[in-house]
Image (cartoon, rainbow, N blue to C red):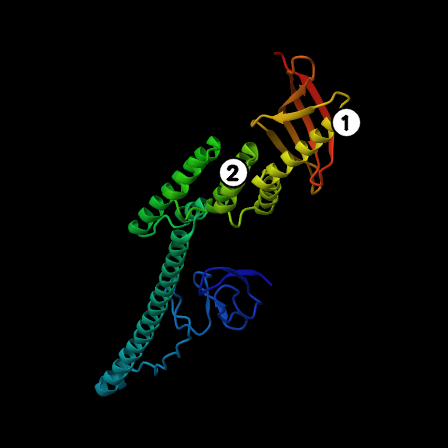
Amino acid sequence: MSIIKCPECGHQVSDQARTCPSCGIDIAGHITKCPHCNEIVFNNQPMCPNCHVALQPVAPLRVAPVMSSASEANPESSDVSERQSSSRRKGVWGVLVVAFVIALSIVLLGAYFYYHTQRQNELEAYENAMQSSEPAVLQNYLDMYVNAPIAHRDSVEAHLLLLKQVDVDWANAVATRSKSSLLQYLKKYPNSVHQTEAKLLIDSLDWVSAGQVNTPEAYQTYLQEHSDGAHYDEAQTAYDRLMALVLSPADRELVIHYMTAHFSNLALKDTQPNVHYTFGEDWQIEKQEVDNGVYIYKVGFVAHKKVETSDVEPRTEVTIYNVTASVTPEGKVSDVEMQKAAQ
């Protein structure tokens, strides 16, 4: 067994192989070696395509013994022999011409199919490159199809430059960590491969901003702008928690009522007679969460303690206190501190 060059496609193949693995043509039993140039050819070819020597044996001409006297005596027999010899030579040349035409047709047909296949492959690669958003895909097309149509190469190069510019702008937008820069990038490149990533960054920036402000309005803005945001549930929880701490007019009225009742009770228990308390309008009330869903009110206000004396000259003594206290929603007052104000 030896390795030969396929007579059809030129690829290396074993002379014992049934067919050529490259072009599929039959090999074993269908090839021979040209006795003149040693080229491997098909054994059914009339002549060698390399040196053009006839491969099929030509029947030897039967030449009658030369008899001078007979030839001279019968000139018609000599003419017949010459015509037969000429006919045989024409026959050999005819075979050679036919074989050449067949070989040329095979070469041209192979070249056509090769060119058509290459053209189809280039067209598919071009369409794929123009639809891709990966610079590596476009660069691979330019490297593989150096002889592609100029219009195709120009289009791919322009697309590649645009993608590289998109990447530069993306890097700049990310480096700034600015919502406005990211929004500007999305407006400029609405179909960018970084679109999802940009939206996630904007979502993250808005969430951090809402947490820093930490007001119901800030969380409400996040919820409105990011209905499918990554932190939507967290924002909703934070919004509900802060809204629960907002002091309603009913809460304010209830706390003042509890504190007024508390000081009325203090007045009744005071050792001094005729004691009563009045209060200013500047009540400072803050609702605080002390446990999960449990709230108290921190209160600050000014109380005037008035004591009416029954001496010879009745008079009213007024003492001003700065008061702080804690009040539960159920009306329990605790942590009452009264500091006498400077008068």
Identify whether 142 is placed above or below 328. below
Taking depth in this image into account, of 307 and 107 the one nearest to the observer is 307
Q: Point out residue 72 in the picture as x, y percentages from the top left corner.
A: 23, 84
Taking depth in this image into account, of 138 and 242 the one nearest to the observer is 242
Q: Which residue is mark 1?
A: 269
The amino acid type, in three-letter code, at marker 1 is: Lys
Q: Is residue 53 left or right of residue 222?
A: left
Q: Point out residue 262 in the picture as x, y percentages from the top left corner.
A: 71, 31
Identify whether 259 is placed above or below 311. below
Q: Is residue 62 left or right of residue 209?
A: left
Q: Point out residue 338 in the picture as x, y percentages from the top left corner.
A: 70, 21
Viewport quadrant of the C terminus: top right
Q: Point out residue 241 in the picture as x, y percentages from the top left corner.
A: 62, 41
Identify whether 60 is placed above or below 175. below
Q: Are marks 1 and 2 in contact (CB under 8 Å)?
A: no
| Callout in the foreground (1, 2) | 1
Q: Which disc number belongs to residue 218?
A: 2
Viewport quadrant of the N terminus: bottom right
The amino acid type, in three-letter code, at marker 2 is: Ala
